[in-house]
Amino acid sequence: MIEELEKNIKSEYNIRLNEIIKNTESTVGNVYMLNCDNNKYVAKVYNNIKHVKSMIKLHEELNKNQIYAPEIIKNNDGIGYTKINSENYYVVLYSFLEGHQVTWDKTKIKLTDNEIIVFANSLRKLHELNNNSEIKLPKIPFGNYKKRKSILHFDLTKQNIFINQDKMGFIDFDDAKFGESICDVSILIANLFCSKTRGANLDGMNKFIDAYYAEDLQIKQEETGLIKQYAIDWINYVLAGNEFSASITESFHVKRKLIEEYL
């Protein structure tokens, strides 16, 4: 695939390609890092043209509304994707999002208050996007809360959240859905504030919720009682649809137990 991808990039895009490296951390195995003369790009290879067009429309909407997310690089014909001729695969080239992923180490055992506020404000801004007529994202497969629907990232792990000074950005919208905004709130809480090694960070969780809802007290009152169920439904959905290692599966079970106990 790398050889075919290299031919495609060199012939279809106006960039000077030096090296292609497959991202071995990608769950699906369709992500490649492109090192060029003066820039970096991320290439994703898909086999579903409907999904490709949905991703292009979605990123156009994100960029138009100044959501910090990768831009899709158009080819020499001004189109947001190319086709690998010998196979039924489509290539989408994304800009490289500057910043660093959310990480944990021995010197940093929890998020700072400023990071929590930036996360909350950035996610709330994403949830202001509520027009799905052209993007055509699939709807979430659970939940029955009928208010405040929006575009959802739906995979808010540490690896998909980037920090660049005072900005927080999102990458990897391939699991994006349309549905109740509370679902993303629940997913982020499950992933960033409930941990097998660190337990439940209730203080950070409450600061995130307060910053996310700000002065919108009525919606806060309605939705905070739903976080527990949406988080559990999301964990059950992920576990049912994927085959993880024993360690990752255990971490999801621990998250669910913490959520059941503390929320």
Image (tube, rainbow, N blue to C red):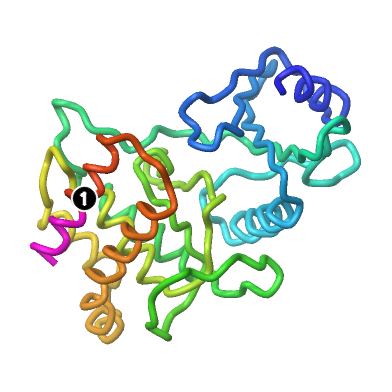
Give the labeled residue for mark 1. 253
Answer whether residue 257 is magenta in the image: yes
Q: Quadrant of the N terminus?
A: top right
Pick the residue in front: 253 or 44.
253
Q: Amino acid at mark 1?
A: His
Answer whether residue 91 is magenta in the image: no
- Residue 205 placement, left or right of 49: left
Q: Residue at x 67, y 14 (%)?
A: 19
Locate residue 56, reporting x and y percent. 70, 53
- Residue 136 placement, left or right of 244: right
Q: Residue at x 83, y 38 (%)?
A: 83
Residue 166, located in which quarter of the rendered image? top left
Pick the residue in front: 250 or 116.
250
Q: Where 9 sits versus 150, above or below?
A: above
Pick the residue in front: 235 or 40.
235
Locate residue 144, reporting x and y percent. 39, 82
Q: Which residues are magenta?
A: 256-263
